[in-house]
Amino acid sequence: MHQIALIGVGRIGAIHAASIAAHPRLALACVADAVPAAAQALAARHATEAVDVDTALAMPGIAGIVIASPTATHVDLMLAAARNGQAIFCEKPVDLDLARAWSAAETLDRMGARALIGFNRRFDPHIASLRDRLREGAIGAVEAVHIVSHDPATPPIDYVATSGGLFRDMVIHDFDMARWLIDAPITGVFAHAACLVDPAIAAAGDVDTARTILTTADGRMCTISSSRRSGYGYDQRIEVFGSGGLLRVDNVAQTMVEHWSAKGRRYAPIQHFFLDRYAEAYRREIAHFADMLDGAAPAVDHHDGVAALALAEAAQRSIASGRMEPV
Amino acid sequence: MHQIALIGVGRIGAIHAASIAAHPRLALACVADAVPAAAQALAARHATEAVDVDTALAMPGIAGIVIASPTATHVDLMLAAARNGQAIFCEKPVDLDLARAWSAAETLDRMGARALIGFNRRFDPHIASLRDRLREGAIGAVEAVHIVSHDPATPPIDYVATSGGLFRDMVIHDFDMARWLIDAPITGVFAHAACLVDPAIAAAGDVDTARTILTTADGRMCTISSSRRSGYGYDQRIEVFGSGGLLRVDNVAQTMVEHWSAKGRRYAPIQHFFLDRYAEAYRREIAHFADMLDGAAPAVDHHDGVAALALAEAAQRSIASGRMEPV
Amino acid sequence: MHQIALIGVGRIGAIHAASIAAHPRLALACVADAVPAAAQALAARHATEAVDVDTALAMPGIAGIVIASPTATHVDLMLAAARNGQAIFCEKPVDLDLARAWSAAETLDRMGARALIGFNRRFDPHIASLRDRLREGAIGAVEAVHIVSHDPATPPIDYVATSGGLFRDMVIHDFDMARWLIDAPITGVFAHAACLVDPAIAAAGDVDTARTILTTADGRMCTISSSRRSGYGYDQRIEVFGSGGLLRVDNVAQTMVEHWSAKGRRYAPIQHFFLDRYAEAYRREIAHFADMLDGAAPAVDHHDGVAALALAEAAQRSIASGRMEPV
Amino acid sequence: MHQIALIGVGRIGAIHAASIAAHPRLALACVADAVPAAAQALAARHATEAVDVDTALAMPGIAGIVIASPTATHVDLMLAAARNGQAIFCEKPVDLDLARAWSAAETLDRMGARALIGFNRRFDPHIASLRDRLREGAIGAVEAVHIVSHDPATPPIDYVATSGGLFRDMVIHDFDMARWLIDAPITGVFAHAACLVDPAIAAAGDVDTARTILTTADGRMCTISSSRRSGYGYDQRIEVFGSGGLLRVDNVAQTMVEHWSAKGRRYAPIQHFFLDRYAEAYRREIAHFADMLDGAAPAVDHHDGVAALALAEAAQRSIASGRMEPV
């Protein structure tokens, strides 16, 4: 059993705690959070220890650290874990500042650290199956990718204000998807964005709706459709256009119930949000972290985290310049 | 151009008139109906002549007769056309009385007549494509068939009273489908029926809902789901279960429009009734009749008409006996 | 925490063990099996005790017994648990002999026992959602039900020989579904069956393919389509036809991946078998058992078990008689 | 009966000829083409007269002119018809040169001409139904549109060379759709394009794959996905994202046949190309032209033709500049 320390017990931290507790090769040695009462509550649920962050980092016998604390703490915690020689699983983004993220990645490399970054969609069985078929050549050469990622409803304005903005907070997942599916360096980014959903988001200095075009050196292209509010659930679709056809992942329905009437055929709504849609992905992500503790290389690491952040920053520049920005 | 006389200008007669008029190798020479004004109206629409039935039968130069008049007239009109040496296209059923239909079929044979019976579904491109794939061996040996045929809404009670009953009037199409898809003699029929939709149908001596099981000598089976009222359109589905998988034809939607909201994803209603659902089948049926006039053998003839009627009669016997009836 | 003893550690027993171990209000106190090594292996996986059956029944502090042992042991184990005053969760069928099952149900009633019978589909979120909508009146009065339940591939012949036959072993689930969805007593059963898939099944005295029609006193009807081999996965579909429309549950796909090519659009296969398709149902079944331990009445009990068995027996009689049999 | 002259008897001209001939209020008075034999062949099929273009324009009693000749002839023919006081139906694009198209439109206005431009998709029953629902407020305010329009296979290189390029020839339909669905002026265009499919297209000076972003003054947006080759049929999809949900039109399948096997569920390919997919749209377009002859205003006119061309030109500028171009 590999002993794991979990830092950060918010919504996503609680999910990871449950996955760690349920995994046959992992044990949740302790949980830590800036809010001690929150740590205690989660610790009680999994019959483990609540400690402060420094104690967690100093605890002997810990093989891996799972970092689900606020973004601003990611870099320091990763470096501390690396100094301990521990395997790292850190939520995205690595940092909101590209230069700082870059520098941290270099340091992690020098220290020989292994860090898994929480791009959960790579572990989704639907998307992973699509990519497997892609790599098997089901549609020949990839020419273009189209990604839809629309949240069901706007987040609290407090969240928006500290999120780093739509591109660093939300589209960053799609930038990672684009890199993973196109499998060639992204060389240009054009983004168009607006605040169409909630003026409070504009007041907080952010946008809520965007369309982004990415290109590779040889002209292949990816479009990303982003919205903070769909009104009909968590719209998560991917299409890959190849020389021999199309591979796509459609949304997952809440149930397979259909109601046919004179008004039409009503199918169940799509899954509501990431906790439903990616429940299995989160479990597989932790299972992959267990494999890392047994020697596997991380499937998606800090370099991927930095690369996705670089695309987010290029998108921001494009918004300002009105042109396609080099990466 | 083959000259065609059309007898019977009701709903289905009008459809055939349009198909004949539009066909490059057919000309609508005349239309006849027991109601002269109806014949005149349809004749005007297609710039042809309205005559009485005897005149139509005596008209020189007529290569083919299309019979869309009431069922009770079918046998006599077919025999008259046969005496003229004309090709016949007669709507289903051949007759409501099995013995009379059987005898007519024998007479037609003796006269060397070629008669196409209006089992329109055989000409539907969806169903025809399913059967082509079946014959190509896509699912190996056929083991079972399931047919759903539910009308959108109950017909007028007047219609019910003279229709010959649910099995002879409506399920007869499904009996023909079963024979065509299983491609082996049906040896037993069990039927269960009730009046669940409208008590007026029971008062008229008929049922509105039925489930029928057909079997072949080697135990292969077909189920038929029948209803005079679906409430959601013309439910027309076929499934064929084989040793290597399933072939099915799903309903056709009115449009491909989808509306996604918090309540679910609403798809357009299915096509409303046979005029929409089988519009193309009716065109192809007439095109096949044109091919018959150029020498082709009828794809579905009076023997098929009699065989389907025999199954309808066996179903009626089964209702009375509560057991599977031999055919 | 309610202490649970599990008897029977085969495929389904192992699933229940995992659900009990993961449930926050249940503890797996011991597991027992006629094969001690099997019990020990499962006990080790869940850090619990492996005992023999008598020890399990005599163990103090056990609140509930989960019976997943061979069918022939069900009645005696239920009665033993009832004598202990324990809540019972017993896999289907109650027994292969209707008279014995009936007598056991009466005894359980006299003893005031609460017994949940493992008709897992009632706990499937898709099917449960369909029934909720039905009870809310989404389609008005229920007129007819159609159930498809086809296994992916034939079971081992050893299993067939001791299973009690297609109707008692497999269709029994559908008989329970029919009762639950029609919500009125079934008064007649007609069944047609054959051995179309594997002659070895006929040699073992069983059939592999069947179609069954059930009726209520007022003529409402249910058809059940049964096969031991689909060739394309675990075909589990339900349709309910009402006065105001249709409710249906379609199959669940393995993934949402689609591959579009010149040959068509290929969607992922449907889920392979019951372990995948009903994984969530099994979890919810155990959660309902936990609710029973906190006082809830069983959602489906030994009377339901007997009623489904009575329908299976009527189906067998119908096969012999060729007629609809009263229940 | 309104007498119609058809000029241009290529693929699309032949379709219009058939629609005119079949329409109850239109008569095909003559057909003209630069290739007399082609005109004669089509005239023979519809029992009408083949003439040269000047004769067609001078023929008395002609109420409407249908122009399906090469793009370079469109402006002159429209002006000639306008001088005759005839109603005009002209295929897209108005011209390849924006200034010339603009000037022609102004002249047509001064002459009081009524001109229908052949943006056939506006007449497609699926797309028209989507727009009706949009205007009824089904999804509230429109925020974004996504259009996929991929041809099945590359056209002949000769065609590419004279087509005016991907944007003027093909994407122009999507520019019109965007304008029609967003229902607000497009103020900016960004386009990214490449030759990914066939190097011969690059050699001919064109691209074969593009992604375009359109914006309105208030930041609403439309993305267009364009390809000269899908490999799986004519991919024609539209999605409109609104404040209250999503409306979409999915592809139309060739048939409703499904084949389920261990490899998955294969659905029929989507319709192959525009002749299938938009057959009904072409009929409705001519029916609308008949309505114009009875006094209706054109549903889409030369100003729409010029506006779509202006977007194509802006897209070309954007390709060159790498930035969003004002319109």
Image (tube, coloured by chain):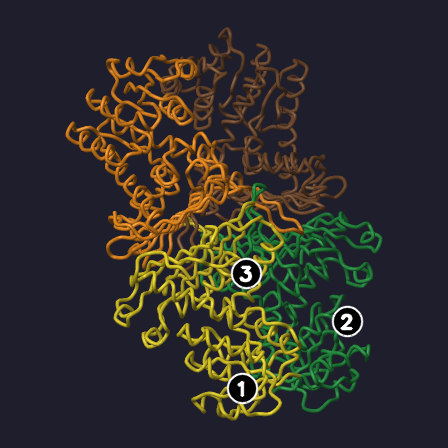
Chain colours: A orange, B green, C brown, D yellow
Element carrying mark 2: loop
Quadrant position of the C terminus of chain B in the picture: bottom right
Residue found at the very far right of the displayed protein:
B203
Given residues D230 and D6, the one toward you in this image is D6
Element carrying mark 1: helix
Residue beneath the point at 32% across and 19% down? A27
Q: Can residue C212 be seen in this view?
A: no
What is the distance, in whole Å, between disc 1 and disc 3 at their CAs? 32 Å
**For residue D207, what is the image quadrant?**
bottom left
User: What amino acid type should be assigned to the residue bearing mark 1?
Assistant: Arg
* Circles 3 and 2 on the same subunit: no
Residue beneath the point at 68% across and 67% down? B306
Given residues C137 and C28, the one toward you in this image is C137
Asked if residue C98 lies left or right of residue D239, the reply is right
Residue found at the very far front of the displayed protein:
D110
Which sits earlier in the primary sequence, circle 1 or circle 3? 1
**Residue B31 position (above or below residue D267):** below
Q: Chain letter for mark 2, please.
A: B
What is the distance, in whole Å, between disc 3 and disc 2 at their CAs? 40 Å
Q: Chain letter for mark 3, please.
A: D
Residue at mark 3: D127
Residue D161 coordinates in the image, percent (x, y): 32, 75
* Circles 2 and 1 on the same subunit: no
Q: Residues within 10 Å of mark 2 (few under 14, many from 20)?
A: some
Residue D180 coordinates in the image, percent (x, y): 53, 61
Please state which of the two labelled residues, at mark 3 or mark 2, is closer to the viewer.
3
Which numbered disc covers residue B70? 2
**For residue D85, what is the image quadrant?**
bottom right
What is the distance, in whole Å, between disc 2 and disc 1 at their CAs? 36 Å
Residue at mark 1: D45
